[in-house]
Image (cartoon, rainbow, N blue to C red):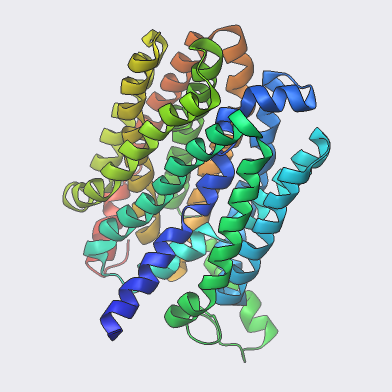
């Protein structure tokens, strides 16, 4: 195998690592009725199964990228993915809802040390003009997880919902076994990030360096990017949970049927992500993000009118693709907004994305139980707020300044 082929193979496996987060998050969406039956909980209480995963995920993402660079990406990724697989097995074996929620908390906290470090490793060596393509391909790997999760969850729901978590744990264990040589090949034998503080640096120097890196995240462009990400996830990007409920409780599909329907949106997102990366490089961050948020919000408005399985499937395919365009746009902006702390910027932005998902899971499910239409329309309205933060952000200035190697 030539050196070029080896590099491409290692990079492909890094892209594949992106599926772990979506698998853990979305595998339970087609199995809501089965979870309600097993644990004797309501639809509103099922929101906590998402909240317990997403809130610690978003909280640790505030610092996980920076800490991962300090402690060494390779060793952090190996340990985090292995423990993530163990926590997922805990979900499968949970005898009560309280134990299930505890395992979900562990899943979310550990995934915070996986996603940003994988993406930062991929984008470290990429030129600014090609960042969009790299992020688009990585997002396609995430979309593969979103594609596989509902199908896996739906199949499991029709047999035994616990099997979905068993399969996810096995996938995590395999990736953990493959990852060491991949991460070391990019970041060096020590596992540290390029440009990071050396292992031999004194403790005060390391602490001061970490503080400087964290302060780089508190600039106006980063804060507005974070606000846009949070609002988008709370609003139109997060409606996959509502679509999963609609497919089971409104349309009356089986677990497999709901999984296949959700898979359509994930497949459309996976297909659109690399192409949208090219569009993003040509249009610029603010234009691409605004167009994606507007399209996603408009399509969410159409979802309440979908009263048949085929109509819901068609609208969801379009909405799923638009939601993935939002994700690609915002991740691409995060990857260039703070080049001196790229992993930290990515984790900071991802933190706000999943905080939005966490809040949405406990806000929209009770609203859905009262009125599905109200839940969809309110989600779309939040997207309008995200458009406002994009328009006021100056995010294109950040992209141009990085591309031209001038201060922002």
Q: Is residue 362 left or right of residue 130?
A: right
Name of the residue lying farthest toward the bottom? 200
Residue under the image location 65 percent in, 35 percent down: 161
Residue 300, image quadrant: top left
Residue under the image location 72 percent in, 44 percent down: 91
Give x and y (percent) for residue 101.
75, 39
Residue 300 visible, this orientation: yes
Residue 389 visible, this orientation: no
Name of the residue lying farthest toward the front? 159
Residue 124, image quadrant: bottom left
Give x and y (percent) for residue 236.
42, 27
Question: How many labels sit on residues?
Answer: 0
Give x and y (percent) for residue 71.
62, 76
Give x and y (percent) for residue 37.
74, 22
Q: Quadrant of the N terminus?
A: bottom left
In depth, the one of 237 and 404 nearer the eye is: 237
Name of the residue lying farthest toward the left? 282
Q: Is residue 91 left or right of residue 365?
A: right
Residue 396 against residue 177 in the figure, above or below: above
Q: Is residue 140 left or right of residue 217?
A: left
Residue 18 against residue 394 in the figure, above or below: below
Residue under the image location 27 percent in, 42 percent down: 272
Residue 24 against residue 36 in the figure, above or below: below
Q: Is residue 254 left or right of residue 208?
A: left
């Amino acid at each position: 195998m030539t050196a070029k082929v080896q590099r491409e193979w290692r990079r492909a496996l890094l892209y594949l690592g992106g599926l772990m987060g979506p698998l853990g998050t979305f595998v339970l969406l087609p199995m809501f009725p089965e979870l309600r039956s097993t644990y004797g909980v309501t639809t509103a209480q099922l929101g906590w199964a998402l909240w317990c995963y997403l809130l610690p995920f978003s909280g640790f993402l505030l610092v996980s990228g920076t800490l991962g660079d300090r402690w060494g990406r390779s060793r952090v990724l190996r340990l985090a993915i292995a423990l993530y697989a163990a926590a997922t097995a805990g979900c499968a074996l949970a005898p009560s809802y309280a134990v299930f929620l505890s395992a979900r908390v562990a899943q979310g906290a550990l995934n915070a040390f996986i996603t940003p470090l994988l993406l930062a490793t991929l984008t470290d060596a990429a030129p600014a003009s090609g960042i969009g393509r790299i992020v688009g391909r990585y997002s396609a790997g995430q979309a593969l997880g979103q594609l596989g999760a509902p199908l896996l969850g739906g199949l499991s729901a029709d047999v035994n919902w616990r099997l979905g978590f068993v399969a996810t744990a096995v996938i995590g264990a395999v990736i953990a076994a493959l990852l060491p040589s991949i991460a070391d090949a990019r970041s060096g034998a020590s596992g540290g990030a390029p440009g990071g503080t050396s292992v031999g640096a004194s403790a005060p120097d390391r602490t001061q360096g970490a503080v400087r890196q964290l302060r780089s995240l508190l600039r106006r462009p980063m804060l507005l990017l974070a606000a846009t990400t949070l609002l988008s996830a709370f609003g139109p990007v997060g409606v996959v949970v509502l679509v999963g409920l609609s497919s089971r409780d409104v349309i009356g599909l089986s677990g497999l049927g709901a999984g296949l329907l959700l898979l359509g949106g994930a497949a459309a997102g996976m297909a659109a992500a690399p192409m949208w990366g090219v569009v993003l490089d040509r249009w610029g961050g603010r234009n691409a993000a605004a167009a994606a948020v507007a399209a996603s919000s408009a399509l969410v408005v159409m979802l309440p009118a979908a009263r048949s399985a085929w109509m819901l499937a068609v609208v969801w395919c379009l909405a799923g693709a638009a939601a993935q365009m939002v994700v690609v746009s915002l991740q691409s902006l995060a990857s260039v907004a703070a080049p001196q702390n790229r992993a930290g910027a990515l984790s900071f932005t991802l933190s706000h994305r999943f905080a939005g998902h966490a809040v949405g899971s406990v806000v929209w499910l009770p609203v859905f139980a009262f009125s599905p239409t109200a839940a969809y329309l309110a989600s779309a309205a939040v997207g309008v707020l995200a458009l406002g933060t994009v328009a006021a952000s100056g995010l294109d200035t950040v992209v141009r300044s990085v591309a031209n190697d001038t201060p922002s």
